[in-house]
Amino acid sequence: MKLEGEVTIQADRQAVWDFLTDAEAISQCAPGLESMKIIEPDKQFEAVAAVGFGTVKVRFVTNVKWVELDPPNMAKMTAHGTAPGSAADVEGEMRLADIPEGGTRMSWSAEVVISGTLASLASRMMGSVSKKIANTFFDCVKGHVES
């Protein structure tokens, strides 16, 4: 499943980059995050998060790796998460650009593949769940970076 969006943040590109590539910083904004552990600074971390699909709540243990960093312009990451009887794989990318009126435009995309027992449930609900999670996350990011 392909997800994508665009967000305008009223802060300079370096400040947006610094926040979004700092695992400790973004952990403040990750919906459902229960714990986060740095495996290798600026390269890899592990997160435990609970995600709700309707009435079903699933706890994923996810390993996240930055696979390409071009500061403060573009970053690519991969993530592999497991939950009882299910798995999720994500390839994500963000691109940052200055906007003429000031601030930063972030374009993002993610390719998400869910397998196992959640696959059929997730395919019906992924759109609405992912939109809610993304909106909550980016509202929080804006609150931190714009202040």
Image (cartoon, rainbow, N blue to C red):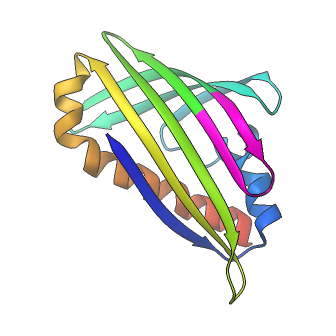
Q: Is 112 positioned to the left or the right of 109 in the image?
A: left
Furthest residue to the top? 85
Furthest residue to the bottom? 101
Position of residue 144 relative to residue 45, above or below, is below
Q: Position of residue 17 (x, y in %)?
A: 75, 56
Q: Taken as a whole, is the magenta stretch helix, strand or loop?
A: strand
Number of dots carrying numbers? 0
Position of residue 99 relative to residue 6, above or below, is below
Q: Position of residue 90 (x, y in %)?
A: 47, 32
Q: Is 119 positioned to the left or the right of 48 in the image?
A: left
- Split into 4 quadrants, where in the image is the C terminus? bottom right
Q: Position of residue 50 (x, y in %)?
A: 43, 30
Q: Residue at x 69, y 25 (%)?
A: 45
Residue 74 drawn in magenta:
yes
- Split into 4 quadrants, where in the image is the N terminus? top left
Q: Which residues are magenta?
A: 65-77
- Residue 55 visible (yes or no): no
Which quadrant of the view contains residue 98? Answer: bottom right
Q: Position of residue 125 (x, y in %)?
A: 21, 42
Which quadrant of the view contains residue 139? Answer: bottom right
Q: Residue at x 40, y 24 (%)?
A: 88
Q: Is 65 positioned to the left or the right of 82 in the image?
A: right
- Residue 20 visible (yes or no): yes
Q: Residue at x 83, y 28 (%)?
A: 41
Residue 2 drawn in magenta:
no
Position of residue 73 relative to residue 110, above or below, is below
Residue sitting nearer the eye, 96 or 24: 96
Q: Residue at x 45, y 53 (%)?
A: 134
Residue sitting nearer the eye, 10 or 4: 4
